Image (cartoon, helix red, strand yellow):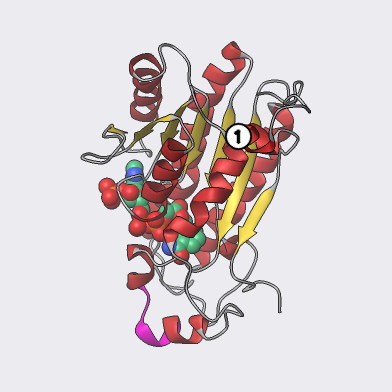
Amino acid sequence: MSLAAHPSPNAPLLSHFSLAGKTALVTGGTRGIGLEVARGLAEAGSKVAIKASGQTVKAYKCNVTHQPEISSTIDTVRTELGSGVLDIVVANAGIATHHAGLDYTPEQFQEIMNVNLNGAFYTAQAAGRIFEKQGFGNVIFTASVSAILVNIPQKQAAYNASKAAVVQLARCLSVEWVKFARVNCVSPGYIATDMLDIHPKEWREKWFGMIPAARLCEPAELKGAYVFLASDASSYMTGANLVIDGGYTLP
Ligand code: NDP
């Protein structure tokens, strides 16, 4: 549903959350957050494509840093799963590394930007071209609380910069595409996935000790937020950044 329309005020509330009949693509759906988001969208009724193999939803292999590849994958998903229609794209694929700002090589810096920013943009743009023709569509980016804070010890300048850029990308596209698509972000805090394992144990302990909720978030705890953003329950929301962090960014 585009911003021009709205759900019937008489429809039962829970029907606003239904994704029945919708087709969605989630990048980075092999594991972690993306896999749970794909499950959530499927539970809410949509047909879901993920980038990978062997899950409860249909899998497509694709590297998001290769623009022609993500573009043709999105076209294939639209044809094969959606009978010509794509409703929702979740640009979630991402990587993290840590290097001191003085040590980054150009290749290390570009690798992060290529996946987290360029890949997210290529995904949204390929979907956006379809959404413009259809007159409706929904883009959700996975950003991060790293878009808005600096962790100490901070050795993630590239990661944090890439996520801050994703938030601003979403804000810009939400206005440009307002006639045909809603564009929003989810910014998770610390989520128990493989991604956290790259950080030294002492950093993790320090960060986790600062979470007011006093625990990590399970990836499945995020799927309700993505279903909300993907569904008519959020029909008037665009350009928003939903922070889900157990209070981490508040103190
Ligand atoms: P994981 O490391 O568990 O999963 C990363 C996913 O991204 C995998 O499916 C991986 O595919 C995919 N991926 C990586 N590079 C590419 C690529 N070039 N093309 C296509 N897919 C790719 O991480 P999370 O689930 O934790 O992270 C998902 C998103 O959430 C990321 O954008 C991350 O930055 C963000 N995030 C994570 C937080 C956390 O605490 N975990 C906090 C805030 C944000 P494959 O399996 O093939 O490698």
User: Could you say where residue 239 lies in the image, as x and y percent from the top left?
Assistant: 71, 41
| Residue at the spot 41% in from the left edge and 70% down from the top edge | 98
User: Could you say where residue 168 lies in the image, as x and y percent from the top left?
Assistant: 66, 47
Q: Quadrant of residue 247?
A: bottom right
Asked if residue 131 is positioned above or below residue 113 in the image, the reply reads above
Whether residue 60 is visible: yes
The residue tagged 1 is 231
User: Could you say where residue 243 lies in the image, as x and y percent from the top left?
Assistant: 63, 59
Q: Neighbour class for label 1 at 10 Å: few (<14), some, many (≥20)?
A: many
Magenta residue span: 198-203
> Does residue 153 appear to the left or right of 60 in the view shown?
right
Magenta-span inclusion, residue 15: no
Query: Which one is nearer the viewer's eye here, 102 or 168?
Result: 168
Asked if residue 242 is positioned above or below residue 229 in the image, the reply reads below
Query: Which one is nearer the viewer's eye here, 104 or 15?
Result: 15
Query: Which one is nearer the viewer's eye here, 76 or 213?
Result: 213
> Does residue 151 appear to the left or right of 31 in the view shown?
right
Query: What is the chief secondary structure element of the magenta stretch?
Result: helix
- Identity of the amino acid at label 1? Ser
